[in-house]
Amino acid sequence: MTRGRVLVVDDSALGRAAVADVLRGSGELQEVLEAEDGFGALRRMAEDKPDLVVCDLVMPGCDGLQLLRLRAAKPELAGIPILILTADGELERKLELFDRGASDWVSKPFDPRELLARVRVHLRLKLLAEELTVANEQLYRLSCTDPLTELFNRRHFDDVLGGEVARLVRYATPVSLILCDIDHFKRFNDEHGHQLGDEVLRAVASTLVRSVRKADVVARYGGEELAVVLTNTGAAGAFVLAERLRAAVERARVTSGERGLSCTASFGVASAEDAVSVSSAATLIGRADAALYAAKRAGRNRVVPWSPALELQG
């Protein structure tokens, strides 16, 4: 049997003991927990996170059906399978149990061999479901992560920015975008080599991540350009953060042998606080890009916020 933790629920101490003794006697479980009714089971499910619940159907206070209803209202408990013990042999009752979310049922009086077999099956299914969830999470991270910098990639950036602009249009929630370009990066690669250039790019990426809020998204926009999507942030706050990022990049050092190398970066900032000013992600990106170009044209290592005047200059 897959080792796991099983919660046994029955208002009868003798009933609980009969089930618990079979499970403990197998020597295959990590732990067997107990509860006297559905309310106690729900508390233990929330606190102890068992891998499986074996619950008697008929109990005073909160029976097996009510436990299934209560669990349905708590998404965080939905992954814990519930196996129902019942003396009711009616097909309609068994179908109702499945409709309410029971994973399986065992007839009472139960055969210990059948009980153990069904417990094994559902613990194994629970383990496989958890492994699948972990694998899917890893695949998702790979699909939205830039392998060099470990930042989010352009695909994820586009999804996030599109979502934030949609929130802006619907709820007037402000959004800001910062584009960052490492100054003279090509020359740096030519003088020091691409391997060290990659280290500089990773160092700048790490600096940005450490300097923003958890709600903000830092992504590799392309080449040596990085992007920061600031949620619920207007123009004033975005400019202050961009200046803080610029200073942090300037202070950062990359060690190469006995040398400590440094770099600077230019920043363009664009913000939107209502759908009248910006109604698409492309517009916000275009404005941030125009501001970034203005920062580089003005001498680099500086922050430039977008303004209508930049379009006239372009």
Image (spheres, helix red, strand yellow):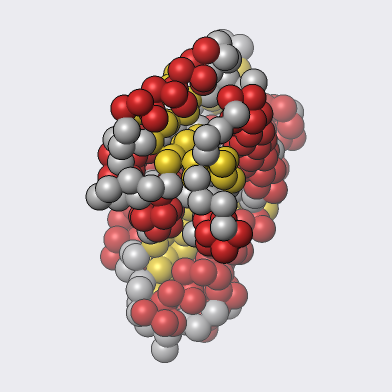
What's the residue at 31%, 27% (across, down)? Answer: 13
Q: Find residue 290 and report its horizontal and vertical position in percent.
A: 55, 70
Which quadrant of the rendered structure holds the C terminus? bottom right
Query: Whole-percent x and y of residue 14?
Result: 35, 26
Give whichever of 239, 107 is nearer the camera. Answer: 107
Q: Nearer the viewer, residue 94 or 295?
A: 94
Question: Which residue appears farthest toward the left when viewing the image?
Answer: 61
**Quadrant the N terminus occupies:** top right
Q: Is residue 309 left or right of residue 96?
A: left
Residue 83 appearing in the image = no
Question: Residue sitting at 46 percent across and 37 percent down?
Answer: 53
Q: Residue 33's x, y, as percent?
A: 38, 25
> On the picture, is 239 further left or further right than 137?
left
Q: Residue placed at 64% from the left, 24% from the top?
A: 113
Q: Residue at x 32, y 33 (%)?
A: 12
Q: Establish if 255 lies above or below 281.
A: above
- Whether residue 86 is visible: yes
